[in-house]
Image (cartoon, rainbow, N blue to C red):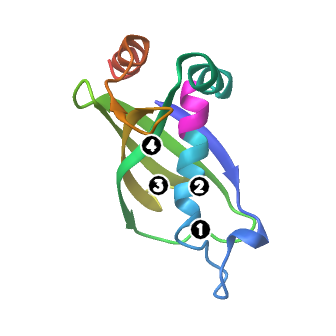
Amino acid sequence: MHVHGVRIYYEDTDFSGSVYHANYLRYMERAREHFFGPEELARMWQTDGVGFVVYKAELTYKEPARFADEVEVRTTAKRESDWRIVFRQDVWRVGGKTPLVEGFVHLVCVDKDGKLIRLPEHVQRAVDAASS
């Protein structure tokens, strides 16, 4: 499991003081970036012409995070096929007993023309290693 910490800033919240719902997708995106490594993602795009795009996202909101909270995105990944990775990404308050948000995010790879391509072998191996 990969864990990525996030501090909740005032700008993350809505008028009620709760984190605006769409911001959880941003936190999950950052966690996935660190799961692979920003340098590796940049290298894949610049050298191989391969990038990731979200195919599907499903979030279940259980409890809000609030201004000044420390939360963590707990990420696991599973290769669903040679074409798709499913990330389980739950957001927890640090020290919390249950997740605030439960998420499943499906990613696919595209080339520089935006056309769907198979997951590169090294990505498949990395995800398989992380899920075992």
| Cα gap from disc 1 to disc 2, whole angstroms | 14 Å
Residue 18 to residue 96: above or below? below
Nearer to us: label 4 or label 3: 4
Q: Amino acid at mark 2?
A: Arg
Q: Position of residue 6 (x, y in %)?
A: 68, 50
- Farthest residue in the bottom direction? 15
| Cα gap from disc 4 to disc 3, whole angstroms | 32 Å
Task: Determine which residue is flagged by label 2.
Answer: 26
| Cα gap from disc 4 to disc 2, whole angstroms | 14 Å
Q: Amino acid at mark 1?
A: Ala
Task: Determine which residue is flagged by label 1.
Answer: 65
Which SS class for mark 4?
Answer: strand
Q: Amino acid at mark 4?
A: Val
Give the extent of the magenta segment: 32-36
Mark sitting on residue 97: 3
Task: Determine which residue is flagged by label 4.
Answer: 53
